[in-house]
Image (cartoon, helix red, strand yellow):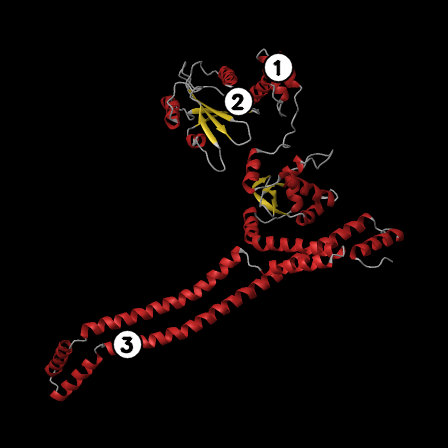
Amino acid sequence: MYLESIPRRLGGLGRHLMDAGRGSNERVIVRHDLSRDVPHDVTLALRMLAAPAHRVTRMKREVVHIVISPERMLSTDELETMLRTIEKEYGIPEGSARLLVEHEKGERARHYHVVYSMVSEATGRALRFNRSGDRDEMLARRFEIELGEKIQPSTRVERTAELLRQRGLADLAEIAAQGPVAEKGRRTSKAETRQNDRLGVDQVLLDERLRQAWRQSGNDMSRLRLELDAMGFCLAAGDQRIAGVPIVMLVDVETLKSTSLTRHLNRLALHGNGPRFREVAIGANFGELPPLAETTANLRKDALPRSADAVLFEFDRMVAEMEADGEREEAAKAKKGRARLDTRLSTLERDDLRARQKQVRDRYRQRDRIRRARVNRAFIAAGLFAGPETRKAAFYLVAAGVLATGAGLMPALVVAGIAVAAIPTFHSARRLRAITDQAAMLERVEMAREVQDETRSFFRERAIRQKAMSEKAYAQHARMRIHRNRQRNALTPEGPPTGVRRAVQGSANRRRGGPER
C-alpha cells in the first residue's frame, strides 16, 4: 500500500482530482457518502476547505492532500476505519470537513484522494505534519497488516516498528519488524516510472542490455563506453553537478530515455561485493561529455535514417542466415524485399519531397497569377477608354494643351494622335492575353522540367546520405570487432591452442556452407 500526506496550496489540485480520459483515469467518482460537510461541486468544495487558511497569519499551505493507494478494492467500512486512524494520527478533529475522490485506472486497484483543511476546526491553528514521511510509512505498514495485504519493502523498517510500539501496537510492531528491507536506490523512482510510460520503455529489457554491456566490458569502467555504444546507448553530461563534476547520464538511443548511469549501475547491484559507485568517480572516469540537451536533439534529428538502417540491418542478417542454411529461394525473396524497402520513401521523406516540388510549382503559379492580373487590368482600361466619345475628348484635350504651350497646329495634332494611339484598346488587351497564354504554355513545360530536376536532386541527396550512414555504421561495427578481438587477445595472450583454432575454423566453415578442412 502507498500512503502519502501532502500539505499544499490548492494550485491545480481540482484539475488533478477530476482528470479523466485517455492517458489518465478511466473513471472519477466523488464519494459523497464518505465526504463530509462540503458541497458536491469539487471546485467549490476545495475553495471551502482552503478558506480557513486565508484567515490565519503567515499560513502558506491551505489544505492537506492525502493519497491512499491499496493493493485491492476496499469496502466503505474499511475506508472509514482507515480515515479515522489517519485523522487520529495527525490530530485532525473528529467530524472535520473533508472531500474524498476515488480514481479508477483499468486493471489497477482503485486509489483515493482525501482533502482536509490545513486549519484545525477545534483550535483554529495549523495542523502538524512533522516527520510525515515516517508516519505515512508507519500507517501504510499498519494498514497492510490489518487488511491482510503483502508487506512492501521499506527503508524505514526499524523506524516503523518503533513508531508502532510508541502507539501501543506491539503485536503489529513485531510483524512490521520482520518485513522486507529495501536497499536505498534499488527501486525504480516514480519519476522514472512515469518516464517509462511516456516513452514506452521496456525497463526489464533496458536493464538486461546494461548488464550485458557490463559483462562484455569485463567489469572494466574504461571499456564500458564502447560496449554501451554497441548495445545502443550513449553518454551525456547532465545539468546537475556534484563537487563540480556533471552527472553522467545514460541515454537510450531508441527511446531517448535518460537516467543517471551511476544510479542505474547501483540499482542493478553491478558493483558486486565492492562499494557502491559514486557520481564523482564515474564523472571523472568518463571525462568531458556533450550536454544532455544537445545529445537528445541530435538523436531526434537522426532518428529517421537510424531506424531505417536498423530495419535494413535486420534484413541483411536474415538474408545471411538463410544463405548459410541453404535456403537460396527464400534468400532471393528476402533480398527483393530489402531492395523494395531500401528504395521506399518514409513518410517524412515523402513529405519533404512533396514540399520541395510544391515550392517549385507555387513559384510558377504565382508568376502566372501576376501575369493574369496584368491582362485583367488591360481589359479594364480598354473598357474605360474604348468609346469614341472618350477618345475624341482625349484628342481635343491633348491638342488644346499643346496649343496652350505656344506650339503650332501641326505639332498639336501629331501629339494628340500619338496620345490617342497610346490609349488601351480591346485589341491590345487581346494581344497581351495571347502573349500571356503562349508564355504560360512554355512555362508549364519548364515547370515540369524543374520539378523533375528537383526530384532527381532529392534522390541524389538521399542516396549520398544513406551511403554516409552505412559507411558510418560499418566503421563503427569494424571498430567494435577490433575492440572485441583485442579484449579476447588480452584474456588469452598466446591465443587458443591449434586444435581449438581448427575446431573454430571448421565450425565457421559449416555455418558458411563451405568445406570443412
Report the side of 484 relative to 466 (left or right): right
Instruction: Say which of marks 2 and 1 sits in front.
Output: 1
Which type of secondary structure does the marked residue at label 3 adopt? helix
Badge 3 local density, few (<14 within 10 Å), some, or many (20+)?
Answer: some
Q: Is residue 246 visible?
A: no
Q: Which residue is mark 3?
A: 430
Q: Which mark is residue 132?
A: 2
Distance from disc 2 to disc 3, alpha carbons, whole Å, reads 90 Å
* Whole-percent x, y for residue 204 in the image: 65, 38
Picture coordinates of residue 326 (x, y %)?
76, 57
Vertical position of residue 345 compared to residue 86: above or below: below
Q: Which residue corresponds to mark 1?
A: 172
Residue 309, x across and y down, in percent: 62, 55
**Would you place residue 251 above or below residue 11 in this image?**
below
Residue 385 vertical placement versus 144 (above, below): below
**Which mark is nearer the camera, 3 or 1?**
3
Amino acid found under the numbered disc labelled 3:
Arg
Judging depth in this view, the residue of 212 and 107 nearest the camera is 107
Q: CA–CA distance between discs 2 and 1?
A: 20 Å
